[in-house]
Amino acid sequence: MGLLGLLAATLIASVSLGAVTVPVDVVWTAVAGHLGVPGVHSDPISDQIVWTVRVPRALLGALVGAGLAISGVVIQAVVRNPLGDPYLIGIMPGASLGAVSVIVLGASAVGGVGLSGAAFAGAMLAFAVVFLLGRHNGQWPPARLVLAGVAVGYLISSVTFFLQTIATPNQVQRVLFWSLGSVAGASWEDLVTLSVVVLAGSLFLALNGSRLNALSADTELTATLGINVARFQLLLMLVVALVTGSIVAVAGGIGFVGLVIPHIARLLVGADHRRVLTISLLLGAVFLPLADIAARLLRAPAELPIGVITAAVGAPFFLWLLVAGSGRRTRTRVTRQGRSPRAIEPAPPPRWAQGRSARHCTAVLRGQDLPRRRGLRGGER
């Protein structure tokens, strides 16, 4: 309930704050008038700002954040890599190539589709190539899938960089702004289309949290539960590709959300995916509108790309994880209660092992006898 309340407050703040601040009571009047509340009449100018521009933008930001966050959880579980995100399986680089092709070469060069259509097609094509290359013996081993994603991502990025070298300065500016992401151009049409994809995909992923626990732990364990591992992996990643591809097509290449939010969720509720998926979805829906508010206010009346804010928050967070985790071993317990990860300090060696070599201690534990060494007291070995 706390996260739901925080989400509601964030959405209200996102509608109210900006280059022009709209009072909360005016926001309520404009929204209530469109929802059919009797006796409420909004001002036409406020109605234009609130209902036509800011409400779709706030809701789109929440959808984008939720979709990227829950997709990041699934990718990290499937590839068993804490750095897993849509970049890792080629979706972001593929979408960037499609969008840059339209910006630099024109829509006619990519079959007459628009910017969003080209970005979605590029994302799906890159995803298909990664999964074809990552397949081995009818399955998708995590290490092979990661290597395929990295290789395809670098190859696609090289083509994207080449297109930028032949672009005009105005086109380069458009490419840069798109690649860092924004929800400034939100419309009700985009919101309706994206909401169907994100909500349906998120519901499917959330319902498979227990299976995802088994898959992230061990492939053989998943098979013993009667789950077709290869089919389940493919289905999960196909849903993730559809969700993230649709998001990138509408909002551009927003980074770090799918990478950072899953780790924050695990710190809060543990490693049980039945909880992590839901909490990540809510955290993402809160985080991205907050980042959008910062992008609007820091250079008002101009706007920063939202990816600048997410990177500025995400990079220090990972540095904090690195510093906080140094010098100790972290053990994550996946239990039915979903306990939090516990940091366990290494215990000091027993008295009999102090000052002894690793070979000596191993032999003692195995019950073997070692020849006495010069200088040891009787009975010590």
Image: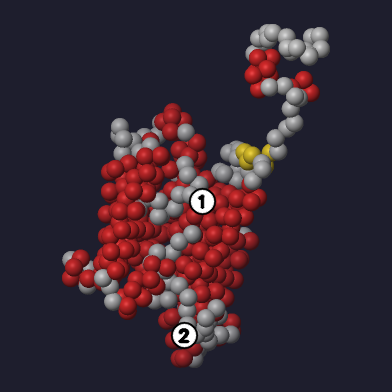
* Residue depicted at x 47% and y 42%: 80
Give the numbered dot on residue 277.
1
Q: Are marks 1 and 2 in contact (CB under 8 Å)?
A: no
Q: Earlier in the sequence, mark 1 or mark 2?
A: 2
Q: Is residue 89 left or right of residue 347?
A: left
Q: Amino acid at mark 1?
A: Leu
Nearest the viewer among 38 and 370 is 370
Residue 326: image location, x then y, percent: 64, 46
Residue 18 horizontal/vertical position (percent): 53, 81
User: In the image, which disc is placed on residue 161?
Assistant: none
- List x then y, in percent, for residue 272: 56, 43
Image: 29 above or below 261 = below
Locate the C terminus by quadrant. Answer: top right
Judging by the rendered image, the residue that carries numbered circle 2 is 49
- At label 1, counting other C-alpha atoms closer than 10 Å, the crowd grade (few under 14, some 14-19, many 20 or more) is many
Which residue is depicted at the point 42% across and 76% down? 184
Would you call the spot at circle 2 few (<14 residues within 10 Å), some (14-19), or many (20 or more)? Answer: some
Q: Quadrant of residue 140?
A: top left
120 lies left or right of 78 = left
Q: CA distance from mark 1 to mark 2?
A: 34 Å
Q: Is residue 312 above or below residue 204?
A: below
Q: Amino acid at mark 2?
A: Ile
Q: Which quadrant of the structure image shows residue 7?
A: bottom right
- Specify whether 219 is left or right of 365: left
- Horizontal and vertical percent position of residue 181: 42, 69
Residue drawn at 38 percent across, 71 percent down: 176
| Residue 30 versus residue 216 in the image, above or below | below
